[in-house]
Image: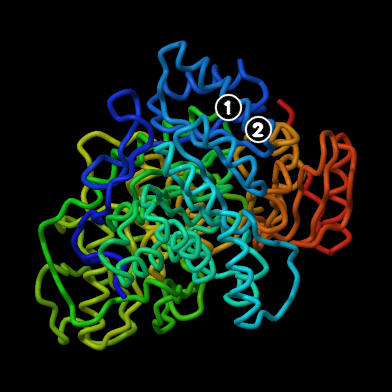
Amino acid sequence: MNYCESPFLFHRRKTREVVVGDPANGGVVLGGDRPVVKQSMLTCDTMDTAASVQQTLELVAVGCQIVRITAPTVKDAANLENIVRELHALGCRVPIVADIHFKPDAAMEAAKWVEMVRINPGNYADSKKFAVKEYTDEAYAAELGRIEEKFTPLVKLCQQLGRALRIGTNHGSLSDRIMNRFGDTPLGMVESALEFARICRTHGFHNFKFSMKSSNPKVMIECYRLLAARLTELGPDWNYPLHLGVTEAGEGEDGRIKSAIGIGSLLCDGLGDTIRVSLTEDSPREIEVCNDLLAQIPRLTNSTFNYQPSTFPFDPFHFERRATPEIGLTDNMKCGGEQLIRVVVTRATFDKVVPKIRPKDDVKPEAVYEDLNILELDPTQEISIEAINCDTQLVTVKDGVALPPILAFRFLVAKLKRLGRNNPILLKDCLTFEPVPLSPEVALLRAAVNIGSLLADGIGDAILVRGESGAGLSLRLAFNILQAAGCRSFKTDYVACPSCGRTLFNLQTVTARIKARTTHLKGVKIAIMGCIVNGPGEMADADFGYVGGAPGKINLYVGKTPIKFNIPEADAVERLVDLIREHGKWVEPEAVEVVSA
């Protein structure tokens, strides 16, 4: 199966067009040769018409092209009529997407008023009680029949009214039926979505797109690749557009890096027709990142050098770190093999940051580039076996090679494989330098896409970030990329959903409070979820969860298991700390030494 035309030369995936609204009157067309469309979501209560209208106008003002609004109940869905009417009265015709999870009746109501309806197959007309159950073929078919009965009326209504659908599966939010047959896997997510797509196609309805979201960029990348490959396998008329997003990416630098790795990697492979960057921040900030990220893709894919090896250089559907021998990086540091992926810096960066590093700091240089015994290769040229006389030689791509880094390092791996070599590889975020230093925002996105994409391919034993000109910032960025890609854990990991109308507490404020108490817990993963929809399932592999259970009430989880219920919000952060302590993962933060003037 192929998920793209070539991993070595950019080709945009060819899709059918999907129409969202009236293109002559503010609507958009997705797919085909159209530019990638930017999307975001409201954070206010859907019953608050004035706030919903105001937030929509703010999003449109910064370039948002599709606005999603949650509709958890029929009452919320009915109020979409008022929101849309007010927007139209103000001359705003941006397409609105109703976000539906558990209630088919809410979807039917929403479809009367908005241009698109998003349904989650794991929640829509299917059971999700995390029950372990064996399904016979007959029982499985019976469940599918029940889903078709519940879903078909929505398909027919969308067909009648000229609406679009988004079939969006989420990692950790699959039905019991899918979980017990396929597990919480990319395959399960794809098969769940295809079941609903087949129902659409049975009725001749094709105006839909897919999404495959996860808070783990590597899982998200695997899901979309597998979906694209399966669609190609099913036939040329299965060429539906894809909506890309890393769900619950979090906030700040971490949220941007996770999103850049997941979304950017797929865009560079030619996949993706709409995108959303999910940040635990005000929604217009998401569009800023969308704009910056999309602006980088032409630069990161611009190449005419085409190389077609006889075998693919990595498995695109199952993550596995490329096997290499373990070698000495420095006198007291190793890389390759089962070693951690190491962080290398330039001599100039080393000299600036080392005087500020304390003995117990985790963020510190592990090698200096200029001091390494490293072989620099040009993968666009023929590489002979004599040039690489052993597998224990660290190699990298030579500076100045006229290729984007992702393609250059994939070429390098392919050529090493052809020669039968498994040398450890040092990844670089850039091979050439801009005449003017990049802004921190752009440097972060470029480094995250270039290095993060290759790490998700399983490529890389050490990394070097140079596009960020600030010494301390470049070092921190390297470690943050490794953490976001799931390669190293040097700090607390947070999975935080973006706010929406379902959220039962202020996500930004609560996230800040939780971070203030737990940011020293190296290796602990904490999920912060505004409601139960994004609760136990979509927390996926988090150690602990803080989930809105009711207004002013919080439920605490260990993994997917609820442990404590209806805790007053004022007490919930400390109760979370108590729960972490009970499970042996709490350590007291080190006292900060105050130096008197």
x then y, percent, for residue 466: 34, 49
Which quarter of the figure is the N terminus placed in? Answer: bottom left
Which residue occupies the foreground of this view, 196 or 585? 196
Q: Is the residue marked by circle 1 packed among few (<14), some (14-19), or many (20+) residues within 10 Å? A: many
Q: Amino acid at mark 1?
A: Leu
Disc nearer the start of the sequence (1/2):
1
Q: Position of residue 344 (x, y in %)?
A: 41, 60
Say if mark 1 contacts mark 2, CB within 8 Å: no
Task: Name the residue carrying label 1.
Answer: 80
The Cα atoms of the two marked residues, 1 and 2, are separated by 12 Å
The amino acid marked with disc number 2 is Gly
Which mark, residue 501?
Answer: 2
Please state the horizontal and vertical placement of residue 309, each as a whole percent of the image. 18, 78
Q: Residues within 10 Å of mark 2 (few under 14, many from 20)?
A: many
Residue drawn at x 24%, y 41% as measured from the top left: 34
Please, what secondary structure does the residue beneath circle 2 have? loop
Vertical comparison of 75 with 584: above or below: above
502 shown above or below 85: below
In the foreground, 62 or 136: 136
